């Protein structure tokens, strides 16, 4: 029986040494040490031995078991180490490889135009004022001297939230807010989003951007307006740019003008860009209507003021030679990445 045990030990250790995976090792362990294993079978047969033989064989059997267990544990350590090594090899990271390039974000062309225009007016001493996009009808129309039957108030032109509130159709209500909150002198610009019920096409969008300007003080004249807009046009479109005022009618200014700049593509000679006119309309302006000053608590006999509004989307299109306004709002990266 002792020889049998030694044979088992020899065979077991040979097998354990030769296995290469954790599964094979486990199988070998079960084969020799498991409940139905070869060593266990021998130990079960010990009942047939004499009382003298039993402790001797028992001792040998214990030695064999310990030897096999030791071999299993040594081998397990080897396999674990080898597997870890293999995993490291597989997950190896080459930190010297170049990384994937990430596309950098950039400023939207409209935002760029607004920043540029804003800086021009900040340099002239204006400050920035802002107002809500959901605006009271009172500020958007009433206080700006818009007649009750003015077509701009129509549901087909204006997005109404309810009877008293609208999505502002212009940045002019910020003028009202400023004049009601502050005493003259006032010199502000107010860039922002405005809304009108226009179906989108090449030159219209239901949401667009205006930059409003307002100056109120003693002795402010149409000449100051002209000088301010001349300066803006030269800085925005180039030093050779001239402006032209054409009489117009807005409810909130009197007199009112539409303002053109000389075409910055042809210098005024006429081209495809200005449709042969030599001039491009970019803004509306005028002297603040006395009714507007009075509705804001400013004495129109003491103070005068001028106001103007520039369409930032239109300026963006003109400056960048874009032929469809919808491109500015579709956020197609293939388009935007060109700026
Ligand atoms: Zn031109």
Image (cartoon, rainbow, N blue to C red):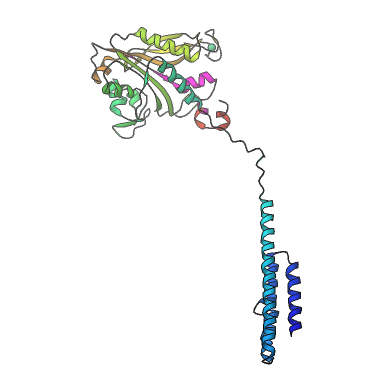
Q: Position of residue 54 (x, y in %)?
A: 67, 88
User: How many numbered badges does the structure rendering display?
Assistant: 0
Residue at position x 30%, y 28% in the image: 137
Q: Which of 60 and 108 is in front in this view?
A: 60
**What stretch of residues is rendered in magenta?**
306-327
* Residue 311: in magenta span: yes
* Residue 37: in magenta span: no
Quadrant observed for ligand 1 in the rendered image: top right
Quadrant assignment, res 183 = top left
Q: Where is residue 297 in the image (x, y as percent from the top left)?
A: 23, 19
In the rendered structure, the answer to whether residue 256 lies left or right of residue 326 reads left
Residue at position x 24%, y 17% in the image: 298
Q: Where is residue 63 in the image (x, y as percent from the top left)?
A: 68, 78
Residue at position x 69%, y 51% in the image: 89
Q: Can residue 81 be seen in this view?
A: yes
Q: Where is residue 178 in the image (x, y as percent from the top left)?
A: 30, 22
Q: Nearer the viewer, residue 281 or 249?
A: 281
């Amino acid at each position: 029986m002792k020889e049998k045990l030694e044979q088992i030990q020899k065979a077991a250790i040979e097998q354990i040494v030769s296995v290469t995976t954790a599964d094979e090792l486990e199988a070998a362990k079960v084969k020799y040490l498991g409940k139905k294993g070869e060593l266990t079978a021998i130990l079960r047969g010990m009942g047939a031995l004499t009382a003298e033989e039993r402790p001797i064989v028992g001792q040998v059997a214990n030695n064999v078991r310990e030897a096999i267990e030791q071999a299993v544990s040594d081998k397990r350590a080897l396999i674990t180490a080898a597997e870890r090594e293999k995993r490291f090899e597989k997950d190896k990271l080459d930190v010297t490889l170049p990384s994937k390039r990430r596309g950098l974000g950039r400023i939207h062309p409209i935002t760029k135009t607004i920043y540029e225009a804003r800086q021009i007016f900040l340099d002239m001493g204006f400050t920035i004022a802002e107002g809500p996009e959901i605006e009271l009808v009172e500020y958007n129309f009433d206080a700006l001297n818009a007649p009750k039957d003015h077509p701009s108030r129509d549901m087909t032109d204006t997005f109404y939230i309810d009877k008293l509130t609208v999505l502002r159709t212009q940045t002019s209500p910020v003028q009202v807010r400023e004049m009601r909150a502050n005493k003259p002198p006032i010199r502000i610009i107010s860039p922002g989003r405005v809304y009108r019920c226009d179906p989108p096409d090449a030159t219209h969008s239901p949401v667009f951007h205006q930059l409003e300007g307002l100056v109120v003080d003693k002795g402010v004249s149409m000449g100051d307006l002209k000088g301010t807009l001349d300066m803006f046009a030269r800085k925005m479109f180039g030093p050779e740019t001239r402006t032209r005022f054409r009489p117009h009618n807005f409810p909130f200014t009197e007199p009112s003008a539409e303002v053109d700049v000389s075409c910055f593509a042809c210098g005024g000679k006429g081209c495809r860009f200005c449709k042969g006119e030599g001039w491009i309309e970019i803004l509306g302006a005028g002297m603040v209507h006395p009714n507007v000053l009075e509705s804001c608590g400013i004495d129109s006999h003491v103070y005068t003021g001028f106001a103007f509004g520039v369409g930032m989307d239109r300026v963006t299109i003109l400056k960048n030679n874009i032929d469809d306004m919808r491109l500015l709002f579709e956020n197609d990266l293939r388009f935007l990445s060109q700026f």
